[in-house]
Amino acid sequence: MSSRVSVRPNSVAKQRIQMGNKAKGRGPLIRHNGGNLTTLLHPMTRHRFDLQDLPATPWKNGGGLTREVLWHPAGADLNGFDWRVSVAQIDTDGPFSAFPGVDRVITLIKGAGVLLRSECGQVQHRLGAPLSPFAFSGDLAIQGHLLDGACQVFNVLTRRAVCRAQVQVVRSACDWPAQSQGLFLALQGQWQLGGDEAQPLMPHQGLWWQGEALPWKLRPQGADPVLLALTVVLLAT
């Protein structure tokens, strides 16, 4: 069983994909062909990570910590990234950073949660149900009010003109369709990811990839397994 949130932006894709955060090599070159995206020959990039090993960066306002999982393209600033994935700990009430032209998906993974309110009234959402992705526009000025102490969230940000994100919560064995780029994060239980080679994941371990569309066989082991699954879809012209 899985739950899905899909953010569907509305403009053009960039022609080159690069991936950073400790990955070796560069991303594939993309050619537009009759409105389709064609990946030219380039080795596939994969990167395993453990949340506990990622540096925790304190927020400037002292309200929490962020662990960056990946930032694409490498070296881009806050105004230049195409997509970004992080895990954040929210310790106090306060504003969320605004990202004009960006769509966001936030998923509660630990704690009681946070109430999200926009100044314009467009968003008033109680993020209190664990593992229930919620999508909203990064253009909005959002205030976060903790429901009962600190909480931890999984964040995905995508440039609206470039790509869209799909976040799913996977709880049982399934065959994952081929995608050119994406990410898996094990939250509970052990998981075996079967692609062209087996990739075991323990809790809080993950894997992201890009450059070649491969199907995955997701196989849980143990009781109450939970896996977060993210795919990022490039927009054609």
Image (spheres, grey):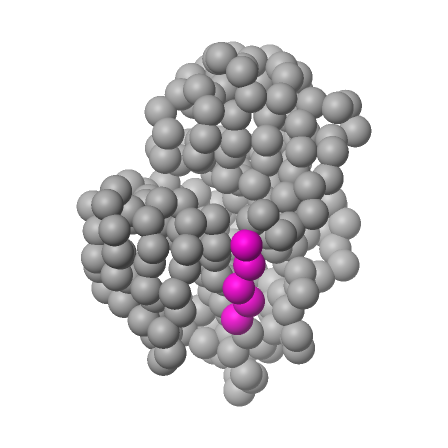
Q: Which residues are magenta?
A: 46-50
Residue at position x 26%, y 61% in the image: 219
Please determine whether, in this image, residue 184 is positioned above or below residue 67.
below
Toward which corner of the image does residue 214 lie, by quadrant? Answer: bottom left
Foreground residue among 29 and 21: 21
x and y percent of residue 116 in the render?
51, 19
Secondary structure mostly seen in magenta is strand
Q: Is residue 101 left or right of residue 183?
A: right
Q: Residue furthest bottom?
A: 41
Please determine whether, in this image, residue 215 is positioned above or below residue 41.
above
Residue at position x 65%, y 38% in the image: 66
Q: Is residue 76 left or right of residue 84?
A: right
Q: Is residue 201 left or right of residue 171?
A: right
Foreground residue among 187 and 213: 187
Residue at position x 40%, y 73% in the image: 213
Residue 157 in view (yes/no): no
x and y percent of residue 220 in the render?
26, 56
Does the stretch in magenta take in 49? yes
x and y percent of residue 99 in the render?
66, 36
x and y percent of residue 38 in the render?
47, 77
Residue 5 in view (yes/no): yes
Toward which corner of the image does residue 65 lie, by quadrant? Answer: top right
Number of on-image labels = 0
Does the stretch in magenta take in 136? no
Residue at position x 67%, y 60% in the image: 21
Please determine whether, in this image, residue 205 is positioned above or below residue 41.
above
Toward which corner of the image does residue 72 lie, by quadrant? Answer: bottom right
